[in-house]
Image: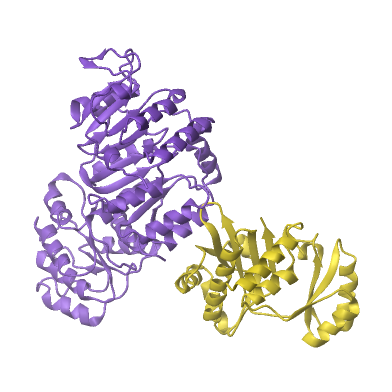
Chain colours: A purple, B yellow
Amino acid sequence: MFDFNALLKPRTVAVIGVSHSNAMHPANVIYDKLDLRYPVQVFPVNPKGGKLRSQTVYKDISEVPGPVDLAVIAARADYVPDILESCIAHRVGGATVISGGFAERGRSDLQERMVAAARKAKFPFIGPNCLGIYVPRLIDTFFLPGERLVRPESGNVALVSQSGGVLVDQLVKFAGQGVGLSVGVSIGNKALVRELDLLNYLEQDPSTTVIAFYIEGFEKGEGRRFVQAAKACAKPVVVLKAGKSSQGSRAVSSHTASMAGDYRVFSAVLAQHGVAEAANEYEMVSFCEALSRCPLYPVEGRVGIVTVSGGHGVLSTDACIRRGLSVPEISEDIRSRIRERLSPSVRPIASLNNPIDLTGSAVDDDFAAAVSGLGQSPDVDSIIILLLPYSPGISSDLGARLSHVHQQMGKPVVAYVPHVEKYRMLIEGFELNRVPVSSSIEGAVLMVEAMKKCHPC
Amino acid sequence: MPSVLKQKMKDLFEQAGADGWVMEPQAKELLRDAGLAVPDFACADTADAAVAAADKIGYPVAAKVVSARIVHKSDVGGVAVNLADESALREAFGRFSAMDGFAAMLVEEMVAGVEMIIGAKIDHQFGPVVLLGIGGTGVEIYQDVAIRMAPLTDQDAASMMNTLVGRRLLDGYRGAAPVDRAALAKTLVVFSELTMAAADWIESIDLNPVMCTADACVIADARIMLA
């Protein structure tokens, strides 16, 4: 219904509501960062006119020279409907309304006026009561000073959040894990543009391969349309739900004026439609990381595990079982194929029952033998490699080498490697070649769980 | 759902609208018309009619009070099971006929099996959803249920059974014959279609218990709450 291209990939931006007296006003923070650090042309707007630094402040959107792709509106709530209407009249491409003081504070009337005008004109606006949009190296309407933010690199995960705070905080975690972002949108009260609109847009967006949402609640019947669209979408969809407890639900209604609904139903219906529900913020990052690094395979969750430490094999098996995955026995046929290829020193001491323990004597070739054996096994549909780089026979090339083994087979591989700087080459050897790497055993198991959850149950 | 049945359902809901719910005999008739299995039953407004119905069905029978004012029959002693003969049936009729709003007595074939519950409600966010759970006395405590958005596919029905903690009860626990999973799946799928068709009128439907055996899946009690 809406054309989001101008809004999400703007080249000209008007920031409406800049202050002459308060340099920390949200509009000023946004204006400054766009002017100083982003490849967009930006125009400050305030009815008083005047100058900001050396720039002309325009009195109205109608005075801004040339077409405006995006209007960022950070004025007082009472003024916003008029501002929005004047943006529509002057053919702005879209808007994000940063200001609060609407439905979440009992002023649904203002919000309804904006929605009516925008819907009539097919004018997309994000918010109100939101942080707006963030596209690495392109646009950032967060009213948070740049030096305070931790910014993820450009990548292929889109994150749509009802909460701006959750979005910013998830971006910090994405950056920490090296998960790249295609676009982040904080939709706040989601008066007009809602999850389903963005799901439909992002499904077509070539720079996005994983679509993640933080959701507090849907309106009547909206959840049904959302899960149906998510099931039909070829890209994996991840959801973190808030408002699961009755106290949490009350907090939701005062936060963004949404209804949290019956969580048991929510969770079951998501699973039914192959939407991967993350239980918490950590799972959210792990799920997005796993799904963004590796193409989607049909995974039921029958896991083959390769390690050099018996303890890691046991811990990961326990984690798999706890998360509804299985660690099945491997047929003798596959085991003997692996055994034949093991180095003579490892062959008599390795344990080839799943989990496969190659022992501390293992060298790169032994890993390659075990992983390619599991790749041929019909008993497993996914592989976890628990790599302890302290082991003397392992080289820094093993990540890239096992990734190449992985590319010969039709099932996903995830790895656990301790995330310390000296193992960076091992990690990148995996990550750059479509094998996601977790910094914990549990995290590696979570990554397989994410792949399983993308299939309807 | 055929349009004749749809119309009949609509008429039923509109008639029952003032009470806010559909009583068991009418609810069961609707379920039977939709192709679901219910016990052989009859409604009797006199003791003699009840005896005649029981003779036809065959003892032992179950008897339940039918009253628009009694939603929870067993809470007021309005359910009698395993009535072995005419005198027991007449005694039950005497008790039921004194109850608030008494309209009739339901006389019904006794059914046994693994007790399951099947339910539906109209969820605010997702519309009609269907629930399957292990029934019996522990139902409130264990809350062992699977929920899916309606309408259900055969795969949905199978996965609902498989996600129950108590699924071993379906597989023939302690020497019992395994439950007819195909019959239970069909019941779920047909019930979900009925729920979709009824969505504009209902708040919830409870089929509790549904008796599952090696060759059938029979709805022993049903209550439809209207929106």
| Residue B149 appears in the rendering | yes
The image quadrant where one finds the C terminus of chain A is bottom left
Is B58 situated left or right of B27 in this image? right
Q: Nearer the viewer, residue A198 or B209?
A: A198
Displayed quadrant of residue B113: bottom right
Is A454 situated left or right of A190 in this image? left
Q: Nearer the viewer, residue B10 or B152?
A: B10
- Residue A251 place in picture, x, y as percent: 51, 38
Is A48 situated left or right of A146 in this image? right
Q: Please give the name of the residue rendered at 61% of the width and 63% of the height, measured from the top-left corner.
A: B198
Whether residue A189 is situated above or below residue B220 in the rendered picture = above
- Residue A200 place in picture, x, y as percent: 35, 52
- Residue B134 place in picture, x, y as percent: 59, 69
Q: How many marks?
A: 0
Whether residue A133 is situated above or below residue B191 in the rendered picture = above
Whether residue A418 is situated above or below residue B174 in the rendered picture = above
Q: Please give the name of the residue rendered at 52% of the width and 79% of the height, measured from the top-left corner.
A: B181
Displayed quadrant of residue A319: bottom left
Displayed quadrant of residue B223: bottom right
- Residue A101 place in picture, x, y as percent: 47, 28
Q: Residue furthest front?
A: A89
| Residue B58 appears in the rendering | no
Is A221 situated left or right of A128 in this image? right
